[in-house]
Amino acid sequence: MPTPNTNLELTESPKASALPAVYQTHFSEIVNRSPEAILCFTDGSNQNGRIGLAFSIAGQTHMFSHRNTASVFTAELQAILLCLENIITRNSSSAPQIFLIISDSLAISRPDSLHPLVNRIHILLISLNTISSKVIFMWVSSHCGKPGDEAVGKAAKQATHLPRISPGLFPTQTDLSSFIHSSIAKKMASTLDRPKIFTQ
């Protein structure tokens, strides 16, 4: 399966080691190389054990609540998948377009990833190629300070408070295993922390 078109230039100047103004200038320079591209942002969030995700296309934001057994990694990939599905829907009857998906997940750039959502993302990218639309992924550090990234990050956090879990969103087997092990470990730690009561 072909490797997605991914711009990883910002991994060479990580936000932690660069001045905010320098990092954002580099970000803007990369984006401005494709002025015709439609900007998309994606993010996933864990707030007190509740999982949410969000994506935006051309400033229009969508947010969803995921199952609490899912990992943030899965939520981030789910946001990318839903973004691509939305692009296909809106682009099926229009002229070919270029979409720049900005994300802090590197998983889609690894064709050897075993995560099931990565495979589904690659399949959608092949579908987009059939309608001559181009998708470019761009990696950024989380909360890079750009308005679109900040808005989607905030929406992903807000999504953790939605009253209903979005249908069709499921954790992976690895997510479930990690959740169960974590729950058992917390339960055992809580039991050990309880004061012992001795009786005669």
Image (spheres, grey):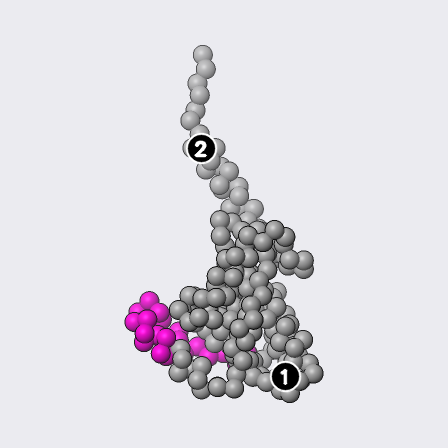
Q: Quadrant of residue 90?
A: bottom right
Q: Which residue is mark 1?
A: 129
Q: Can I make out residue 99 in this image?
A: yes
Disc number at residue 41?
none
Q: Can I make out residue 113 in this image?
A: no
The residue most toward the top is 200
38 shown above or below 187: below
Dot 2 amino acid type: Leu
Residue nearest the viewer, comparing 20 with 104: 20
Considering the whole magenta stretch, tell me its main secondary structure.
helix
Residue nearest the viewer, comparing 173 with 8: 8
Dot 1 amino acid type: Asn
The residue most toward the right is 93
Crowd tier of the residue under label 2, counting other residues whose Cα lies within 10 Å: few below 14, some 14–19, many 20 or above: few
Q: Quadrant of residue 197?
A: top left
Disc number at residue 192?
2
Q: Position of residue 17 (x, y in %)?
A: 30, 69
For mark 1, give the secondary structure. helix
- The magenta span reads 4-26
Which badge, 2 or 1, is on the more N-terminal residue? 1
Look at the numbered discs 2 and 1 and tell me whether their residues touch, using CB distance below 8 Å: no
Residue drawn at point x = 37 percent, y = 79 percent: 26
Q: Nearer the viewer, mark 2 or mark 1?
A: 1
Residue drawn at point x = 64 percent, y = 72 percent: 85
Q: Is residue 84 left or right of residue 30?
A: right
